[in-house]
Amino acid sequence: MTVAAWEDLLKQTEHLPRKDRLKLAAHLIKTVHPSALPEMKWKDIRGLLPCPALGEDAQTWVTRNRAASDSRESQWVGK
């Protein structure tokens, strides 16, 4: 590829929307190294962890983390 063709290609990609640039980048990476971006879906990993994961109930984890987040936020309120 010539330098002029390369520069023209780069200019064309600058005008693509972000979503399309990400698709293009993923496509280019796959063509160079096909196993670099495996196609993963949530349903593919469903059930891999034992229930409850890490020995803690999901609702307990959510409640604990929300309380910690609220505690951090309260430190910033009124400052």
Image (cartoon, rainbow, N blue to C red):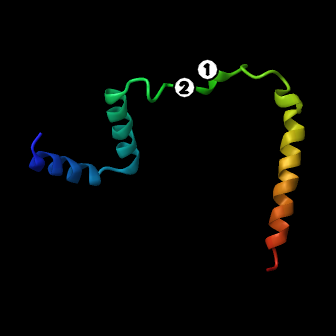
Q: x, y (%) of residue 51?
A: 83, 23
Q: x, y (%) of residue 16?
A: 30, 50
Quadrant of res 34:
top left
Helix, strand or loop for disc 2: loop
Q: x, y (%) of residue 57?
A: 88, 32
Relative to 1, residue 52 above or below: above
Tell me the amino acid under the disc marked 1: Asp
Q: Which mark is residue 61?
A: none
Quadrant of res 77:
bottom right
Q: Residue at x 31, y 28 (%)?
A: 31
Q: x, y (%) of residue 45?
A: 65, 22
Q: Which residue is mark 2?
A: 40
Q: Which residue is mark 1?
A: 44
Label 2 close to label 1 by CB (< 8 Å): yes
Real-space Cα separation, disc 2 to disc 1, in angstroms: 7 Å
Q: Quadrant of the N terminus?
A: top left
Q: Nearer the viewer, residue 4 or 22?
A: 4
Give the number of callouts: 2
Q: Quadrant of the C terminus?
A: bottom right
In the displayed structure, does residue 58 sit left or right of residue 4? Answer: right
Helix, strand or loop for disc 1: helix
In the displayed structure, does residue 7 sit left or right of residue 17? Answer: left
Quadrant of res 33:
top left
Q: Residue at x 82, y 79 (%)?
A: 78
Residue density around tag 2, few if under 14, some if 14–19, many if 20 or more, within 10 Å: few
